[in-house]
Image: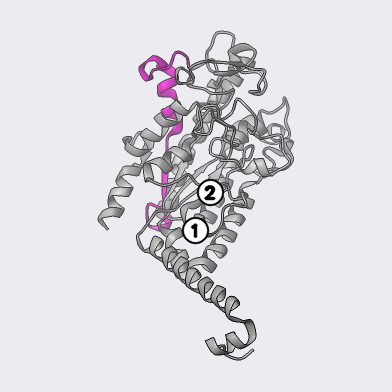
Amino acid sequence: MGKLNTVTLYTHMGAAAVTFFLKFAVIFGLSAALLAADVAEGRRAFFVFGDSLVDNGNNNFLATSARADSPPYGIDYPTHRPTGRFSNGLNIPDIISEKLGSEPTMPYLNPQLDGQKLLVGANFASAGVGILNDTGIQFVNIINIYQQLDYFAEYQQRLAKLIGAEKAKKLVNDALVLITLGGNDFVNNYYLIPFSPRSRQFTLPNYVDFVISEYKKVLKRLYDLGARKVMVTGTGPLGCVPAELAQHSLDGKCASELQNAAYMFNPKLARIIKCLNKEINCNAFLAVNTHQIHMDFITNPKAFGFVTSQVACCGQGPYNGVGLCTPLSHLCTNRDEYAFWDAFHPSEKANRIIVDQMMNGSNTYMHPMNLSTILAMDSNA
């Protein structure tokens, strides 16, 4: 088809059609300009990878049992409805988005994540996954970490079509990234059942080394995909969650074997992060000591305004740690008094404590620097 001018358009389309065509062209051009302006203003995108601690609802779009799409999940969310977050309200990524002055990231599988919403970033996390691809296989249909990274590559292609390849690359390089993995590799793999395949294959120290070596590959892949400001969380105190207390504790003390796994894993993860930063000659990866952040309020809950750090708000059985949180479960009346929302996941109040330490914590909690320091450095750049 040859080059069209307005006269040719009138001839072939008629006046009404041309008016619509020209209006559409103006609107499209304006939208493209606005998108470019958003990027130029330096609005920081945010990307999230990992498991149920940071899943914003991707599993709602999958045929899996690892879902939080029914009440009372979401009871304290602004809509008071379940969203797929494993929380009574906001989770860690939501609160980080608050700190950034941004809207929450949307699940990547949500069809509404399109157009200008892509500039905010995306959440690729999926409940049940681990560092290893065989972690969480009992949940059947979840997004393993390498599939999450493949989706990240796909996202960047979509973004480049929207704002151009150069601006898309800059948006990704400047973005904040959170990755939360590791806990399921122990709870839902090595210790899932007695004499699990992985526990027969590896002693615990050797398994930890294997998982760490695989995590290094994941982090390298994330860097290769353009991530340059990556917060990497360690595992929480695996033996102290209500689910493990219900199974292994008669006196409320944390389950020693799972705690040993966390004590082995977390320092080795911190060392790997240091090694990676040295290899690439920049501090692209930040180690988040979530184990110590949790232990602060688990060992001294009253100092943080909690009544208990052992009993979950929602559940049944000892410590409300048996089975799932459902409409039939025991449900506390004041979620802010409980460090744990359900058998495995912190309450919104606990999530806020975690993010506060990520924002402002000392090197004990954030290494080599906290999030506020990063944001200040960027604003002065």
Position of 311 compared to 295: left or right?
A: right
Q: Which residue is rendered at x = 35% and y = 33% of the image?
A: 364
Q: Secondary structure at mark 1?
A: helix
- Horizontal side of residue 341 vs 67, given as left or right: left
Q: Is residue 175 above or below residue 70?
A: below
* Residue 158 shown left or right of residue 103 in the figure: right
Q: In the rendered image, which quarter is residue 325 located in? A: top right
Q: Quadrant of residue 282?
A: bottom left
Which circle marks residue 216 in the picture?
2
Amino acid, disc 2: Lys
Q: Quadrant of the C terminus?
A: bottom left
Query: Residue 339 placed where, x, y %?
Result: 47, 21
Residue sitting at the far top? 251
Which residue corresponds to the image point at 61% horizontal and 40% vertical from the top-left? Answer: 130
Query: Going from the N terminus, do you reach mark 2 or mark 1 first?
Result: 1
Residue 159: x %, y % from top left: 52, 63
As displayed, is residue 361 above or below residue 49? above
Badge nearest the viewer, 2 or 1: 1
- Residue range (magenta): 279-308
